[in-house]
Amino acid sequence: MVVENLERTLKAYEGLMKLTPDGDNPVKVMPDARMAEIPLGGISVEFIEPDMDKESPFSSFLREKGEGVFCYCVFVKDYDSHINHLKEQGALLEEVEQKDFFPDNPFRIAWVLTENGVGTRIELVDYDALPESEK
C-alpha cells in the first residue's frame, strides 16, 4: 500500500488492530521511498511512503490516486518462465532489478501493469534469487 505518512500509518494499525512490524528497525530506506512490512501469518502488508521529490511509480500513484493498494505481490519460482509466458501473451510489463533491499543479493521483479485489464498492478518477484533468510 502506498501511504502519505509511514509512521502515522503504522501507529494506526497498531492502535486499531494491534498489528506491528517485526524487528527493532522495521523501516527500510530505498532511494525513492521508505517502507515497512506488517506480517499477518503467512502473508504480509507492505506500506510504502514515497519520496515526493523523486519521480517513481509510488510517487506517481500517490499524486494521481491518493493512498491505497499499489500492487499485489507474488513470489514465483522459475521467474523467467513466468515472464516469458506473460510476454508471449502480449502483457505490458515493467521489469527492474531490485538492489536496494539486499545489495549482496539483487533480485528481479516485474509489474504486470493495469493496462492489461488486471485492475491493480501485480508484482512478480524472483523467489529463487532471494537470500535464504527471506524465503
Image (cartoon, rainbow, N blue to C red):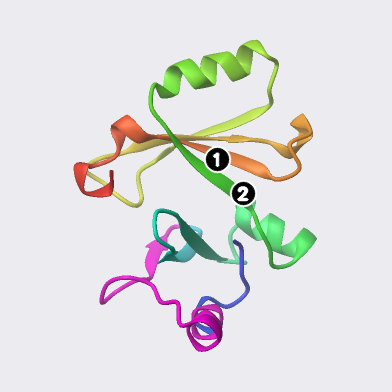
Which picture quadrant has residue 67? bottom right
Q: Is residue 126 left or right of residue 102?
A: right
Residue at the extreme front: 41
Q: Which residues, given as a range, are shown in magenta?
A: 9-31
Quadrant the N terminus occupies: bottom right
Any magenta on residue 17?
A: yes
Labels 2 & 1 near each other (Cβ < 8 A): yes
Q: Is residue 30 visible?
A: yes
Residue, far top: 88
- Image position, residue 105 (x, y; %): 25, 40
Where disc 1 sits, the SS reads: strand
Residue extending farthest to the bottom is 15
Three-letter amino acid code at the position of disc 2: Cys
Residue annotated with mark 1: 123
Say few, some or many: other residues with alpha carbon within 10 Å of mark 2 (under 14 / 14 to 19 / 20 or more): some
* Residue 115 placement: quadrant: top right
Q: Earlier in the sequence, mark 2 or mark 1?
A: 2
How far across and down, in percent of the image, does residue 74 sit? 49, 40
Please give the name of the residue rendered at 53% of the width and 79% of the height, measured from the top-left corner.
Answer: 13
Reply above or below: 19 against 56. Answer: below
Locate the C terminus by quadrant.
top left
State whether residue 55 appears in this view: no
Q: Residue at x 62, y 29 (%)?
A: 93
Q: Which mark is residue 71?
A: 2
Q: Which amino acid type corresponds to the residue marked 1 in the rendered image? A: Glu
Label 2 vs label 1: CA separation?
6 Å
Residue 39 on image: x %, y %? 40, 64
Name the side, left or right, on which 131 lies relative to 31: left
